[in-house]
């Protein structure tokens, strides 16, 4: 089976549409969400080729295939993350500046900032006394590095 486009995302579907279908899942590491061409296997052992025509990343919950009885959905394997919970704007500005200088991609959920685990970041947070926790957590999209150069 070759997938060339995303059918939908389960977050935008009616619950009855989802529940009436058998769901197979494709578990991807978050950094594989950016790959438009890849070969994957569902949790039922079905091999699938993905070659997306649209220039977009995969997102947790994307429906790769759907018919009247079945659907194949993208799920993400939990990442080892540092979840940062700054107590005030100054702490948020400080850590955002420090991480930005290192060009580390971050994601945000509510009042939390998440970065992939790095012992140097953990040491920095301890030194700055900014609250954080290390946990395995699923993210909905890939951590993307933003292209940037300090020189011209």
Image (cartoon, rainbow, N blue to C red):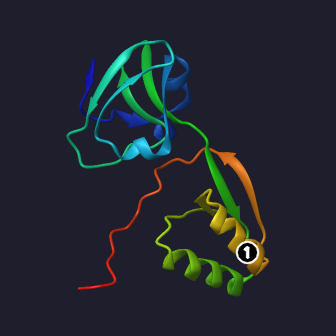
Q: Which of these two is toward me, 120 or 137?
A: 120
Q: Is residue 112 at least partly visible in the picture?
A: no
Please determine whether, in this image, residue 30 is positioned above or below residue 85. Answer: above
Q: Foreground: 152 or 59?
A: 152
Q: Residue at x 56, y 82 (%)?
A: 97
Image side of residue 134 versus residue 66, left or right: right
The answer to whether residue 47 is above or below residue 36 is above
Q: Which residue is mark 1?
A: 86
Q: Is residue 115 above or below residue 152?
A: above
Residue 140 at least partly seen = yes
Residue depicted at x 56% and y 74% = 99
Report crowding for label 1: few under 14, some 14 to 19, many 20 or more residues within 10 A (C-alpha): some
**Quadrant that contains the C terminus:** bottom left
Locate residue 105, reporting x and y percent. 49, 64
Q: Viewer-proximal residue, 127 or 74?
A: 127
Q: Position of residue 55 (x, y in %)?
A: 24, 49
Instruction: Indicate the secondary structure of the residue bearing disc 1.
Output: loop
Q: Residue furthest left?
A: 53
Q: Residue at x 70, y 66 (%)?
A: 122
């Amino acid at each position: 089976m070759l997938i060339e486009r995303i059918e939908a995302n389960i977050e935008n579907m009616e619950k009855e549409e989802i529940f009436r279908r058998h769901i197979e899942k494709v578990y991807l590491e978050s950094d594989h969400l950016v790959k438009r061409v890849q070969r994957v296997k569902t949790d039922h052992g079905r091999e699938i080729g993905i070659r997306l025509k649209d220039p977009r990343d995969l997102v947790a919950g994307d429906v790769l295939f759907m018919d009247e009885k079945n659907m194949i959905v993208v799920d993400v394997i939990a990442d080892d993350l540092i979840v940062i919970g700054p107590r005030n704007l100054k702490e948020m500005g400080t850590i955002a500046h420090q991480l930005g200088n290192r060009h580390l991609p971050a994601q945000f959920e509510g009042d939390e900032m998440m970065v992939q685990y790095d012992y140097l970041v953990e040491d920095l947070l301890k030194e700055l006394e900014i609250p954080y926790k290390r946990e395995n957590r699923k993210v909905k999209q890939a951590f993307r590095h933003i292209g940037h150069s300090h020189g011209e």
